[in-house]
Amino acid sequence: MRKIILFFVMALLSIGCHAQSPSVAYDHVTGTMMFDGGKDYAVVQMEGTQKELHDLIMTNLTRICNNASDNVTSFNDASVSMSAVTKLFTLDLSMGIKQQWDGKIKIDIAIKDGKVRISAPVLSEVYDSGKTFIPYGGSFKSWADWYVYKSESKQQKHGYAIDQLNANMTALVNAIVSKSDGDW
């Protein structure tokens, strides 16, 4: 009986810890990235002083960004702004050919004692196989509306691209606010 109760307590604790991780998703109505609940930001409760959390965020961004000195700006331990190019998704074209899509994103982070407020990634440019891509209509939303959301058959055929985008942006946001110091 004691083992069963311990199992349920551990399961509830793991669910509680998992709920702290923000989840990002592409909203095809507005053409922007949003957190759960339709907000363009998430507040993550974290233990530590403003200085400790700032140092943690900066360490995480240094680990994530290839050239953090060019991509990350810090403002007096109170906020951090990141602008970088990241992988959005990979399209499977005909005959096994894959096409990688990258995007220039911007994320703003505000820091207080015990809290980190992180904005949803804002996509400003799209790159197709390393070259700047200007979609018909001029925005990623216009591309997604035509390529993914135009019909049910296109959603079934290309919807995995938006799933990859959501997973990649969620992983990026969670890596920024992670308290893990690696496995070494």
Image (cartoon, rainbow, N blue to C red):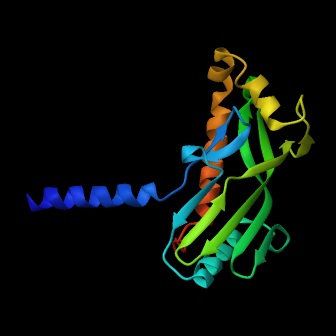
Image-based side of 10 in relation to 32, left or right: left
Give left or right: position of 21 versus 70.
left
Q: Residue at x 68, y 66 (%)?
A: 109
Q: In this view, does 177 lie above or below 164?
A: below
Residue 7, percent across and down?
21, 57
Q: How many marks?
A: 0
Image coordinates of residue 40 in percent, x first then y, are 66, 50
Identify the residue shown where x is 64% and y is 78%.
Answer: 54
Quadrant hosting residue 163: top right
Q: In this view, does 76 lie to the left or right of 48?
A: right
Please identify the quadrant where the N terminus is shown: bottom left
Residue 143, position as x, y percentages in the image: 81, 30
Q: Which residue is drawn at 89% across and 29% down?
A: 137
Residue 60 makes an appearance in the image: no
Answer above or below: position of 23 versus 146. below
The picture quadrant where one finds residue 92 is top right
Residue 76's image quarter? bottom right
Q: Is residue 112 above or below residue 145?
A: below
Percent of width and height locating residue 167:
60, 45
Check the image and report above or below for 101 versus 76: above
Horizontal side of residue 42 vs 83, given as left or right: left
Furthest toward the left, the residue is 1
For the question of whether residue 135 can be seen, the reply is: yes
Q: Residue at x 59, y 57 (%)?
A: 42
